[in-house]
Image (tube, grey):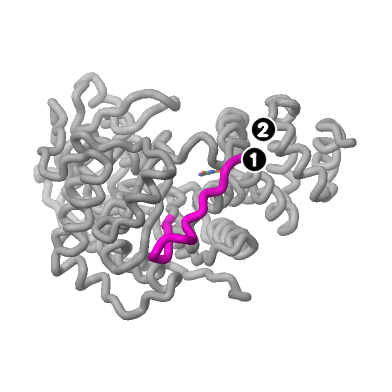
Amino acid sequence: MHDAVSIISAKRDGRELTDAQIDWVIESFTRGVVADEQMSALAMAIYFRGMTRREVARWTAAMVASGRRLDFSRLPRPTVDKHSTGGVGDKITLPLAPLVAACGAAVPQLSGRGLGHTGGTLDKLEAIRGWRADLDAAKVAEILSDPAVGAVVCAAGADLAPADKRLYALRDVTGTVESIPLIASSIMSKKIAEGTGALVLDVKVGSGAFMKKLDDARELAQTMVGLGADEGVRTVALLTAMDAPLGYTAGNALEVRESLEVLAGGGPSDVVELTLALAREMLWSVGIDDVDPEQKLRDGSAMDRWRAMIGAQGGDPDAPLPQARHTEVLLSEADGVVCELDAMAVGLAAWKLGAGRARPGESVQAGAGVELHAKPGDGVSAGTPLVTLHTDTPERFAAAKRALTSAWTIQPYTPMVTTPLVIERIEDPSG
Ligand code: URA
């Protein structure tokens, strides 16, 4: 017979937990037998002591088993999803899901909502009139099977990895989020329960990301790729740069607008590059190697899928996007070249303007956010616009401006050292 105190003490003292101990503690926590304070203490012990490869795999499997595991294996097309560990201006799912569907795969993307400085995909799509995030599993399967749609982005039901939902809420308030085994098992338990056949991970690294250091991002990616392989989900990870925001917008409707530019064959080059890199990985992972995603952006088929995907979830793709009631433009004080732009500062400013929430359940402003006019590599002159702030509540401008105080570094002449957007690719060595 197990008990929470001896499991917490074992991990505190650096011992490896057995499979039976892990199964028991996750199952008992899900049933409310292990109390929140005990699980929080265990999370802190894991934070300091880590977990072995075997422990993380078992922990992940136990969290998957705490709820329902969807199964799309009978769909006529292979399923593949993408997960990003979160970045500023990261709107990639919006063009990517319909693009990959247009190339012949089915994309079941069950997402969470944004909290803090990175925006949530569901919040972005909810800027579109009528669009609904809550679908039941039957509706998800119906949309995925529809040959004219094939992509769903919706809220993950409460029955998918419920142990993770409860544990994540505790970690959020006990300083135990930043643990690689806990992050890896949290993300992968949800993705495995979602029932996707293959998964591409976009693991962000840099000032605007969870993982600030390349070695940590690599370890997280390798752990997640291994967990996917253990559960039969073919998983590949790209480590990608998140020092500057992606594209020129951060904020819900603003990001939808920029995604539409990409789907129309234009858009910012970094957003296009990352969308195509992830699309190619997704298609490769399900064995589709005879379709060029770039062509699908150019010929309008990705845009057609977008319209079908939005319509299938009640949205009106032709409705005008909401606009914030107030804007304020900040001007450059110097002539020169932008050599740095701090993604975290931009994310915080968008959040302060009302694009994000501080607590789960709060509402967000669809039109709020930050529109950049200059990014690293762009020339600016004193008096020209650097950024436009958007909000419905102008009393928020001051906080956003404070967040942006030293976001830009502008120098008279800068030999630009450009870091590649896609830094590294990681796949399961045995796969
Ligand atoms: N995202 C998750 O889903 N879980 C974590 O632990 C961190 C980020």
For the record, the magenta segment spans: 67-82
**372 lies left or right of 218:** left
Residue 227 position by quadrant: bottom right
Residue 146: percent from the left, percent from the top? 30, 56
The C terminus: image quadrant: bottom right
- Whether residues under marks 1 and 2 lie with C-beta atoms below 8 angstroms apart, the answer is yes
Q: Residue furthest bottom?
A: 290
Q: Ligand 1 closer than 8 Å to the CB at disc 1?
A: no
Badge 1 crowding class, 10 Å Cα cut-off, few under 14, some 14 to 19, many 20 or more, is many
Q: What SS does tag 2 mark?
A: helix
Q: Is residue 215 visible?
A: no
Image coordinates of residue 54 in percent, x first then y, are 74, 57
Residue at left offset 23%, top offset 61%: 377
Q: Helix, strand, or loop for circle 1?
A: loop
The reply to whether the magenta stretch includes residue 73 is yes
Which amino acid lies under the numbered mark 2 shown in the image of this protein? Thr
Q: How many marks?
A: 2
Residue 414 position, x and y percent, is 26, 63
Please tell me whether residue 125 is drawn above or below residue 431 in the rendered image: above
The amino acid type of the residue labelled 1 equals Ser
Which residue corresponds to mark 1? 66
Say the numbered circle drawn on residue 30.
Answer: 2
Q: Nearer the viewer, residue 403 or 112?
A: 112
Query: Image point 51% across, 34% down: which residue?
Result: 158
Residue at (43%, 43%) from the top-left corner? 137
Instruction: Compute the Cα span from label 1 to label 2.
Output: 7 Å
Residue 103: image location, x then y, percent: 29, 68
Q: Is residue 169 magenta?
A: no
**Where is residue 228, by image quadrant?**
bottom right
138 relative position to 165: left or right: left
